[in-house]
């Protein structure tokens, strides 16, 4: 019995050879074409609008010739091709890989902006989940902060403003929902988020007016007066201020700032000329 077991053992050297062979790439999976030929084929596919196939071809350049001069360019073009094909996850992976390998390359700002755009292009209406909007905000800020004074940073800043406006719009939509149902505290929390986090957006005048409505509904008169005063100081000609003014005067009140209010503190640098 022992003897038969020994006969079944494979010599160590032979086993090592077998394992080594298993790790070797299958020659049938290798593309024998020169790197320039594969790269030119990928370019041709991209020129024809076959971006998904082009991306895969650029990936082949990187896989087969990782240390060639073409590999870096192929990595970036792969990211761009995946992006144009609408495969945003793969586009981000390729762009992130490029940044990991070439963080100081002149095309690094392009790679970072592509990551931001891959989220930005997936932003949906304010009635749905805003996960992509928040990711876009982070990536756009990263573009502006890491690559200031570049065309990519300027492009990112424009989209950053729109992204902030979108997030503010989401808060406003939820706040209005609560306000209509007289859930004043929940509504105020949403409008407060707009005032504190998205003060430079187009939603700020309405947010201040809605605070007047919510605080009046709760009977918190001083806060309502403060919101109206800040609204009148910053947006005196707006219809929102006119509505707030009418709401207060209809109750024999007038806009009046309370310097201890969180609203005043949020706007102190504007109203008082001070910095927080």
Image (tube, grey):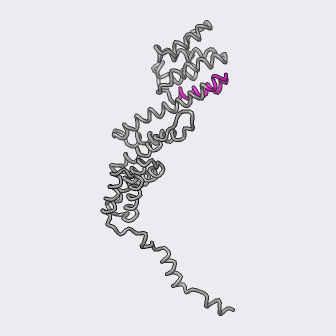
Numbered range of the magenta stretch: 177-196
Outermost residue, top direction? 252
Which image quadrant is residue 44 in?
Answer: bottom left
Q: Residue at x 53, y 29 (%)?
A: 169
**Above-or-below relation of 107 to 22:** above
**Above-or-below relation of 202 to 151:** above
**Above-or-below relation of 87 to 200:** below
Give left or right: position of 235 versus 148. right
Q: Residue at x 33, y 39 (%)?
A: 151
Outermost residue, bottom direction? 3
x, y percentage for residue 141? 44, 39
- Secondary structure mostly seen in magenta is helix
Q: Residue at x 43, y 42 (%)?
A: 117
x, y percentage for residue 176? 60, 25
x, y percentage for residue 116? 44, 43
Residue 123 lies within the magenta run: no
For this rendering, which residue is in front, 228 or 3?
Answer: 3
**Above-or-below relation of 267 to 14:** above
Numbered-mark total: 0
The quarter of the picture where the N terminus appears is: bottom right
x, y percentage for residue 208? 54, 20
Which image quadrant is residue 250 in?
Answer: top right
Which image quadrant is residue 171 in?
Answer: top right
Give left or right: position of 121 versus 152. right
For this rendering, which residue is in front, 114 or 273?
Answer: 114
């Amino acid at each position: 019995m022992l003897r038969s077991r020994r006969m079944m053992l494979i010599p160590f050297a032979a086993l090592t050879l077998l394992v080594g062979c298993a790790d070797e790439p299958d020659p049938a999976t290798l593309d024998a074409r020169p790197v320039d030929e594969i790269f030119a084929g990928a370019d041709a596919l991209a020129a024809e609008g076959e971006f998904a196939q082009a991306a895969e071809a650029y990936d082949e350049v990187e896989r087969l010739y990782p240390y060639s001069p073409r590999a870096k360019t192929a990595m970036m073009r792969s990211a761009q091709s995946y992006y144009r094909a609408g495969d945003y996850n793969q586009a981000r992976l390729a762009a992130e890989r490029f940044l990991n390998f070439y963080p100081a390359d002149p095309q690094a700002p392009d790679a970072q902006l592509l990551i931001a755009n891959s989220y930005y292009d997936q932003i949906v209406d304010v009635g749905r989940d805003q996960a992509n909007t928040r990711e876009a905000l982070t990536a756009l800020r990263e573009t502006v902060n890491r690559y200031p004074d570049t065309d990519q940073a300027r492009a990112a800043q424009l989209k950053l403003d729109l992204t902030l406006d979108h997030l503010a719009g989401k808060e406003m939509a939820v706040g209005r929902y609560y306000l209509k149902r007289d859930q004043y505290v929940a509504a105020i929390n949403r409008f407060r988020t707009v005032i504190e986090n998205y003060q430079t957006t187009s939603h700020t005048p309405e947010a201040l007016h809605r605070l007047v409505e919510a605080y009046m509904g709760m009977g918190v008169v001083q806060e309502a007066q403060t919101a109206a005063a800040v609204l009148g100081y910053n947006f005196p000609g707006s219809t929102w201020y006119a509505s707030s003014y009418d709401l207060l005067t209809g109750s024999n009140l007038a806009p009046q700032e309370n310097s201890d209010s969180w609203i005043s503190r949020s706007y102190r640098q504007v109203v008082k000329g001070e910095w927080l």
